[in-house]
Structure formats: structure tokens, C-alpha cells
Image (cartoon, rainbow, N blue to C red):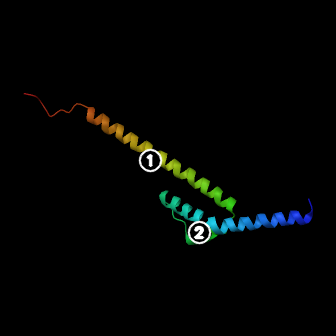
Amino acid sequence: MSELKKSAGADAAAGLERLATAILGPAVVKELERAGEYLGTRITPEQRRELLKESPQRLVQAAQLAASAVMLRQQTETAEAVRRSLVEAETARAPFHKGPVS
């Protein structure tokens, strides 16, 4: 392949990356903010600006990490809810003693 074709391909790839960052970057950052809020942390304005400068690959990595953290939190919440339900069901089945029967 000629150097001109390689250069044109590299330019096209760079242009596509810039376009993806411009279009999808803010949406991914917004979802990262929402995930952070769900997890009990807030992204500062400075962190948001830094995230918006990241490449699409880095944003995807951050989004995958956030998705894993959110899923872990949801699984933990579900397990805690099931545990509470089991305790409540066990308590409801337990015999209730009002006192001595005459």
C-alpha cells in the first residue's frame, strides 16, 4: 500500500474518532455521571471536563467499569431485599404467643 493511501486511511480514522468523541462523548459522560450518582459519588465539573477530552476507547473503558459497579450494587441491593423478605416470612410463620390461655 502506498504511503499516500496509508496517510489517507489514518486521517479518515482520526476524523471518525473525533466525530465519535464529539457526538457520543457527552452522552457517555452523562451516563457516567448518572452511574456515579447512583453509586453515591458525584463527578466534579473539572472531572467532567477531563472526561470530555478522553478518547472514545477510554470512555468505553470507563463506562464498562461503571456498568460493573452499578451491577454489583444492584446485586447487593437485591440480595439484601431477599434476605429481609426471608426474615419477614420466617417471623410471620413463627407462632405468636399472646400469653397464657385460660
- Which residue corresponds to the image point at 54% horizontal and 63% vertical from the top-left? 33
Q: Amino acid at mark 1?
A: Glu
Quadrant of the snapshot with the C terminus: top left
The outermost residue toward the top is: 102
Q: Residue furthest left?
A: 102
Q: Residue at x 34, y 38 (%)?
A: 87
Badge 2 density bin: few <14, some 14–19, many ≥20, Cα 10 Å: some
* Picture residue at 59% right of the left edge, 72% below the top: 46
At a point 62% along the width and 64% down the height, the residue shown is: 24
User: What crowding class fits label 1: few (fewer than 14 Cα within 10 Å), some (14-19), or many (20 or more)?
Assistant: few
**Residue 97 screen position, x and y as percent:** 18, 32
- Using the rendered view, name the quadrant where residue 95 is placed: top left
Q: Quick one: SS at disc 2?
A: helix
**Left or right: where does residue 3 sit relative to residue 72?**
right
Write down the residue under mark 1: 77
Q: Where's the N terminus, which quadrant?
A: bottom right
Q: Which residue is mark 2?
A: 48
Identified by mark 2, the residue type is Arg
- Quarter of the image where one finds residue 28: bottom right
The image position of residue 35, as x and y in percent, is 52, 58
Q: Earlier in the sequence, mark 2 or mark 1?
A: 2
Q: Position of residue 25 (x, y in %)?
A: 63, 65
